[in-house]
Image (cartoon, coloured by chain):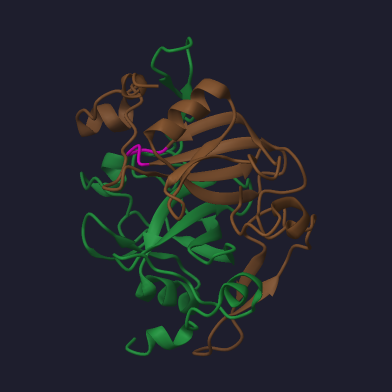
Chain colours: A green, B brown
Amino acid sequence: MSDSPTLFAARGSLRDIEEGTAFAPKFDDAGLITCVVTDGGSGEVLMVAHMNAEALVRTIESGEVWFYSRSRARLWRKGETSGHVQKLIGLRVDCDQDALWLKVEQSGAGACHTGRRSCFYRAVVRTASGAPPVLEFQDERVFDPREVYGGANEQR
Amino acid sequence: MSDSPTLFAARGSLRDIEEGTAFAPKFDDAGLITCVVTDGGSGEVLMVAHMNAEALVRTIESGEVWFYSRSRARLWRKGETSGHVQKLIGLRVDCDQDALWLKVEQSGAGACHTGRRSCFYRAVVRTASGAPPVLEFQDERVFDPREVYGGANEQR
């Protein structure tokens, strides 16, 4: 996909970026943009991940969600190992076009490599003023990550 | 708040981080952590912003949401200019503890400095294969940003 960059507009004036209709996503110094993924049904936040330009092009072209894995330094089709693919049902961009919100249909049991539906399975709870907060588990496992990922510790 | 860091646990083993009850948020090289803010009522994603350790401590201690502004290089209490403060009603952390999900009660008309309820007021829409996507406005303005911010172009 050597023509990938042509899918995106150049960054224009602040007014163009905030009030225009040209899609000019801002990638950071590492070439990445932050993505929030929510479940199209429940609205729950499933995960936060990153895309590079190529992952974004592939997502838009295919309708299946791709990311860029910083730890593995490569493109990553969500669900390529687990089968837990994400079908894109809605894509939004924020005011300054440096973050994306993806609404998806999550295939399979869950999005998180730990076996939960969402990566956000723990609440941060305050016990007393000045005391360290503790984490409380909110979501049960919905699949066995050892069976699905075979020991790979990434949410593929 | 010189004792801020003591509110957070040291980063332990992968198992501690993913399956433990100690809150050990991971701040990036710039000292920041990505935050997704959703409306506690509608579930809509309102904004994506960043906190440093101090902003996170203040948020947990006060129950009002603080961020760290990268463009202004300073702490920022959401709503300090606009009055559109965010009351924290739920805080979650993701599997590897490098992203936070805040559920808030949004005071005032909206979260976005452009006058919309959410910063994600435009959908990315594909017109034809290979053609650049365009943005379609989904949300009307709910307040006049010039009246609320007086020309300051930040979502304070």
Q: Main secondary structure of the magenta part?
A: loop
Q: Residue at x 53, y 36 (%)?
A: B66
In the image, the segment drawn in magenta is: B94-98
Q: Report which quarter residue A32 is drawn in.
A: bottom left
A88 vs B95, nearest the viewer: B95
Q: Residue at x 32, y 29 (%)?
A: B24
Please provide percent x and percent y for residue B132. 53, 86
Q: Is residue B21 left or right of residue B91?
A: left
Q: Residue A82 at what x, y percent from top left?
A: 34, 54
Quarter in which the N terminus of chain B is drawn: top left
Q: Is residue B24 above or below residue A120?
A: above
Q: Is residue A39 left or right of residue B14?
A: right
Specify the quadrant of the image occupied by residue B142: bottom right
Residue A78 visible to the viewer: no
Q: Is residue B149 magenta?
A: no
* Snapshot quadrant of residue B118: bottom right
Q: Is B83 positioned to the left or the right of B30 in the image? A: right
Residue B18 in percent (x, y) is at: 31, 33
Residue at x 52% of width, y 46% of height: B36
- Name the residue furthest front: B150
Q: Residue at x 36, y 25 (%)?
A: B23
Give whichever of A58, B38 is nearer the camera.
Answer: B38
Q: Residue furthest top?
A: A128
Q: How many marks?
A: 0
